[in-house]
Image (tube, rainbow, N blue to C red):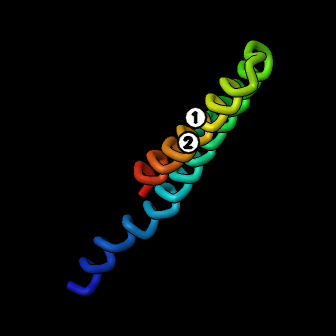
Amino acid sequence: MYYHWWLLRIPVILFLPSVLYDLEIIFLIFTFIFLHLNLGLKSILNDYLHNKKTFVFLLSLIRICSFEFIRCVLEFLI
């Protein structure tokens, strides 16, 4: 019966690195999506907005939304 315990544990031990590897890939994908989104929105603001108050307001809104996006991604990964 001792081998039965090992037969149950070995697949889990072998499966764990693949799960961690998948989480790293998901984290990298979300990181690149976040950076692309953030830089794209900032470049749109710089190109098309000339009113300083509107620019600052929308830039702060982008930053708040960025923090919320990071929070949601972390909740998804944890």
Q: Residue at x 56, y 54 (%)?
A: 21
Which quarter of the figure has residue 6? bottom left
Q: Residue at x 77, y 16 (%)?
A: 50
Q: Percent x, y for residue 23?
A: 51, 52
Q: Which residue is mark 1?
A: 61
Crowd tier of the residue under label 1, counting other residues whose Cα lies within 10 Å: few below 14, some 14–19, many 20 or above = few
Marks 2 and 1, how far apart at CA: 5 Å
Closest to the observer, 39 or 74: 39
Contact flag, marks 2 and 1 (Cβ < 8 Å): yes
Q: Farthest residue to the bottom: give it.
A: 2
Q: Residue at x 45, y 63 (%)?
A: 16
Q: Secondary structure at mark 1?
A: helix
Q: Which residue is mark 2?
A: 64
Q: Percent x, y for residue 31?
A: 63, 43
- Against 41, residue 67 (above or below) is below
Closest to the observer, 39 or 25: 39
The amino acid pointed to by label 2 is Ile
Q: Percent x, y for residue 72?
A: 44, 46
Crowd tier of the residue under label 2, counting other residues whose Cα lies within 10 Å: few below 14, some 14–19, many 20 or above = few
In the shown orientation, is residue 69 left or right of residue 7? right
- Against 3, residue 63 (above or below) is above
Quadrant where the image shows the N terminus: bottom left
Q: Secondary structure at mark 2?
A: helix
Query: Which dot marks residue 41?
Result: none
Q: Farthest residue to the left: give it.
A: 1
The amino acid pointed to by label 1 is Leu
Which quarter of the figure has residue 63? top right
Quadrant where the image shows the C terminus: bottom left
Closest to the observer, 27 or 64: 64
In the shown orientation, is residue 59 left or right of residue 78? right
